[in-house]
Image (cartoon, rainbow, N blue to C red):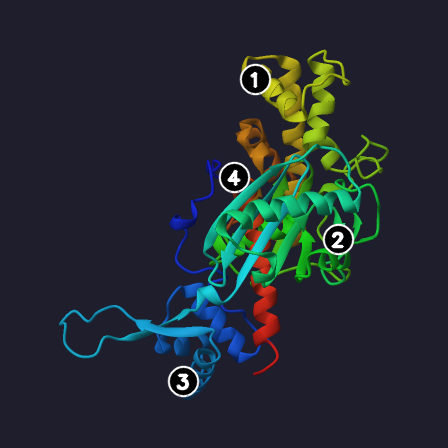
Amino acid sequence: MYDRPADAMPAPDDFPKGCGPLLASSGYDATPLRQKVFEHVRASGRAARADVTRALGISAGSTTAVTSDLISTGWLREVEGTPRESGRGRPPVALEVVAETHYVIGIKLSDENHTAVLTDLAGNQLADATLPTPPVRKTLDQLLAETEQLIMALLTPRGMKVREVSAIGIGISGLCDNTSGIVHWSPLMLENDIEFRAAFEERFDVPVHLDNDANVLTLAELWFGAGRSRSEFAVVTIEHGVGMGLVLNNRLYRGTRRMALELGHMKVQLDGALCRCGQRGCLEAYLADYALVREASTALGRNTRNLQSPHAMLETLYGQAQAGNQAALTIFRRAGRYLALGLANVVQLFDPGLIIVSGERMRYEYLYADEVMSETRDLILFNGPPECKIETHAWGDLVWARGAAALALSEITAAALGGQS
């Protein structure tokens, strides 16, 4: 039921060729045919026209007409396919994305490190950058200034300007509306109900697409990772907070107000521990970084006003637990029990075939111990076959940024190709 964590996401060259969901949506799908054909080629890396015809269930004539249009408008090009074994005859022709026509940036804004990647239209990662940042709440202007530093660190070494970028995708923790670009609440920001997208576009003059950071990590799994060949799966993130993303029928689910699946703010204890959102009893108040640090200061006899960073405090706590310190062990074990509760609730509500538990904290084996999985099973009403598979992925912030780049790629593709059938 539970796989040990991967040490890191594969380097860009190790990704399967192509990017994007590999499965076609089932049932009614209003996506225009031009967009479907393009996205199939991009997901495959390269595809012959016959492959497109079979995969999408359309006529050969439709495939020829649509691909000819995509070639003439500069979205696809013909390339030589796999040589014939006999060496005779004309080599088969395949299609591939004209990757260099568009560039996008994906950004994850975080408590301690902002990260960014530059990718082309085919999803190839071309560059990355990281900007350490003080773990304090910031004004909108301060956050935009830090974002500008990050973008310049990404583009300047390549001699590129922001105007050469077609779109920017951003993942940020908290409650944000993907449609309006408003951040209603974020632990990174001092103000609430901020029109982040409008302010960003005014400053940088480039389209920006904003989403919750758990959603962009889910997109990374859907476009580049374990979710590419799955139509339904869930992602649970454990880092500075606790988040969740859900894919249904190969699409990211966001809810009516575009702010669904705030697993970290699901109440698990009435009048319980104080959460950074200001309410009490939220799941992340028992499981996230700041919750473990809060407990660690007591268990290790440290002054909460000391200068040790939260990351250093957690590493100290982990070292103490490994050395057999019972107070430290108790903190991790309690966090593991709350993780089991959260996972059981996800299974009970959505019945996914796969849950990916991700985030830097999954390096701590106490959060994926056998006891945690045993308690998860016990909390599920019916756990017959096939069991929900649970995997742990412990990679870093660049993967979240790749998911934000996937958000930007998805948006520019839909804008350009989604208006015609």
Query: Mark 3 and 4 residues: CB-CB less than 8 Å, in contact?
Result: no
Q: Distance between the residues labelled 2 and 4?
A: 24 Å
Mark before the other along the chain sequence, 2 or 1? 2
The residue at 57%/52% (across/down) is 403
Query: Mark 1 and 3 residues: CB-CB less than 8 Å, in contact?
Result: no
Q: Is residue 207 above or below residue 7?
A: below
Q: Say few, some or many: other residues with alpha carbon within 10 Å of mark 4 (under 14 / 14 to 19 / 20 or more).
A: many
Mark before the other along the chain sequence, 1 or 3? 3
Q: Name the residue under label 2.
A: 176
Q: Which amino acid does label 1 sit on?
A: Gly
Question: Could you say where residue 111 lies in the image, as x and y percent from the top left?
Answer: 68, 36
Q: Say few, some or many: other residues with alpha carbon within 10 Å of mark 3 (under 14 / 14 to 19 / 20 or more).
A: some
Q: Mark 1 points at which residue?
A: 319
- Camera-nearest label, 2 or 1: 2
Q: Is mark 4 on a helix, strand or loop?
A: loop
Q: Which of 269 and 157 is in front in this view?
A: 157
Q: Mark 4 points at which residue?
A: 395
Q: How far apart are marks 2 and 3 (CA)?
A: 41 Å
Q: How far apart are marks 1 and 4 (CA)?
A: 20 Å
Quadrant of the drawing holding the C terminus: bottom right
Q: Is residue 133 left or right of residue 267?
A: left
